[in-house]
Image (spheres, coloured by chain):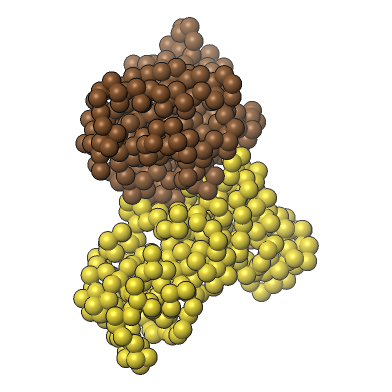
Chain colours: A yellow, B brown
């Protein structure tokens, strides 16, 4: 076993890179742009180049390097293949084969949300727990399922796609995925803003939210913190949707801990209160004690998780 | 590695036992009663005795035996411990330690529904698939989640407790678990009968179900097969509940196949049609192709799965 590994998080605009030692300390961290032109054909060669350059710059011996972990926005199977990754302009790609060919370093690949979940388990909000659901509340709702410290990727690389769980029969507007009534439509930053706009339109009740320039998830939770009743009702609706859905997910994977990350999680502990309240109401008795935590690694969760994949 | 193993399925009234070879052929199959008196303290000693007697009877060499797999009706953690198993009158029990002490044979233990799921994956309706959700539609709704050919047991041994997923806010009668609106309340044999009684009470519409002695899940699907419109509506409601719930579960574990077993599954392929129709409507795009199968091992699924645990 080597002494170092690389954790790479490929996003639609930048590629985050980290050099780690075995105990999970980050020794160096940098970014390169994601070049999506030409069907994204430069992306993996760029990653290979920056890794090989770092090895030379740091005077590392390749024998001391355990390998490369890499997270990408797309469904990745256990062999490191993606059928398609829209944000990278990729069709089929065998990430593991390509990276190993270019670097001669052992490579593991995973879906970016799954890899971030692994990172939070290893060094973040989920540290100390072996079974986790990570929920990422951003523009959409992403998720990652960790069982016995390992990522579940599923038959089609779609395990943990909890943002597309059906939670409401009354929503007739389609989600980005084509279905209607997905969790993402009511629990993402966009979804929370939408719930707030609905609540504002339903009455003339005064609310701080009527004075903000743009009704956002942040504005909602800022108003909740100073006791705005209308915003509190929005938070309550959000909490009911997400808490109830998480209670259903827990009947499948029965996690020790549920970790909430993404931009919306910046609202802090108050967010967990609204989710946990409904989770406890709907959860199966054996799962009611599941711990709720905020994610702590922010945008670095992906590189931590990618590194951890290599060390497993 | 030995040439034989035992698969044991401990139920509330009988203990099913099987002797298997490595390729999964069953060489002998027998039952003993479950003695639940004295806090179930005889149960594991009885299992040990019947196994040791079988070894002697068949003139087997202990060195040729890989071990014992055992499924019990209760939450079992990865170390083979149960905190409590109500149907066996057990409090805390370390199944693995007890069985290994009494038999000197390596033992693995699991929850009975999980173990049955593994059996169906190995030699039943799910053969050939690595990622599975098994749904058992009996008096209740049980489940087992298989990921990469292994049982998921979860943080509290409650993974796969899909019968207690919340699916309906309007149900105010409590489930056996204490919550209201569980899948079990609408998709078990009991639940289907209840939906039928509701449908019968809601109008005077003629139906075959008005002439049966007892409205049961079997009576409903018998009537569906000859085109009874009221029974068909009941099957449709059942299919919507279960299909929609399975679509949500698939966002968590993304199975290759969903296998439907238990008494209700004797209705045959028509049952799958009603479930699959709604599954496809609500499932995330990547999961819409998930295969639906009927379980094929019946009451033997438990002993097959128990044996497979040992061989893994």
- B238 sits to left or right of A34: right
Of residues B240 and B61, the one nearer the viewer is B61
Q: Is residue A134 visible?
A: yes
Of residues B107 and A308, the one nearer the viewer is B107
Of residues B53 and B168, the one nearer the viewer is B53
The residue depicted at 77 percent of the width and 58 percent of the height is: A229
Q: Is residue A282 above or below residue A209?
A: above
The residue depicted at 34 percent of the width and 87 percent of the height is: A60
Quarter of the figure with the C terminus of chain A: bottom left
The residue depicted at 40 percent of the width and 43 percent of the height is: B151
- B287 sits to left or right of A144: left
User: Residue B266 location, x and y as percent?
Assistant: 35, 22
- Give the image quarter of residue A213: bottom right
Q: Is residue B84 above or below residue A305?
A: above
Q: Is residue B161 visible?
A: no
Q: Is residue A300 above or below residue A158?
A: below
Quarter of the figure with the N terminus of chain A: bottom left
User: Residue A293 location, x and y as percent?
Assistant: 61, 61
- Give the image quarter of residue B293: top left
User: Residue A149 location, x and y as percent?
Assistant: 45, 58
User: Residue B269 location, x and y as percent?
Assistant: 30, 27
Of residues B120 and A93, the one nearer the viewer is B120
- A31 sits to left or right of B295: right
The residue depicted at 44 percent of the width and 32 percent of the height is: B102
Label tally: 0
Q: Is residue A41 above or below residue B38?
A: below
């Amino acid at each position: 076993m080597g002494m170092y590994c690389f954790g790479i998080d490929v996003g639609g605009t930048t590629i985050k890179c980290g050099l780690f030692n075995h105990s999970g300390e980050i020794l160096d961290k940098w970014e390169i742009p994601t070049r999506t032109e030409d069907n994204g054909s430069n992306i993996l060669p760029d990653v290979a180049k920056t890794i090989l350059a770092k090895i030379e710059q740091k005077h590392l011996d390749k024998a001391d390097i355990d390998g490369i972990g890499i997270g990408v926005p797309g469904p990745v199977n256990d062999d490191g293949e993606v059928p398609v990754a829209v944000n990278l302009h990729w069709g089929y790609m065998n990430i593991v084969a390509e990276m190993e060919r270019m670097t001669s370093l052992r490579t593991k690949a995973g879906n970016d949300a799954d890899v971030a979940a692994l990172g939070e388990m290893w060094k973040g909000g989920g540290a100390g727990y072996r079974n986790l659901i990570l929920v990422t509340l951003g523009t959409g709702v992403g998720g990652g399922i960790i069982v016995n410290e390992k990522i579940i990727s599923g038959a089609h690389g779609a395990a943990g796609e909890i943002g597309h769980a059906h939670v409401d029969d009354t929503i007739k507007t389609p989600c980005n995925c084509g279905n209607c009534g997905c969790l993402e439509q009511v629990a993402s930053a966009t979804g929370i803003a939408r719930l707030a706009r609905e609540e504002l339109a339903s009455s003339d009740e005064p609310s701080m939210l009527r004075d903000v320039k743009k009704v956002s998830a942040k504005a909602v939770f800022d108003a909740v913190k100073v006791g705005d009743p209308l915003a509190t009702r929005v938070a309550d609706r959000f909490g009911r949707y997400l808490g109830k859905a998480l209670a259903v997910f827990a009947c499948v994977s029965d996690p020790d801990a549920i970790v909430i990350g993404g931009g919306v999680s910046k609202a802090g502990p108050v967010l967990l209160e609204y989710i946990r309240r409904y989770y406890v109401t709907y959860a199966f008795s054996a799962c009611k004690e599941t711990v709720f935590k905020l994610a702590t690694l922010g945008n670095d969760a992906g590189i931590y998780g990618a590194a951890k994949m290599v060390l497993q």
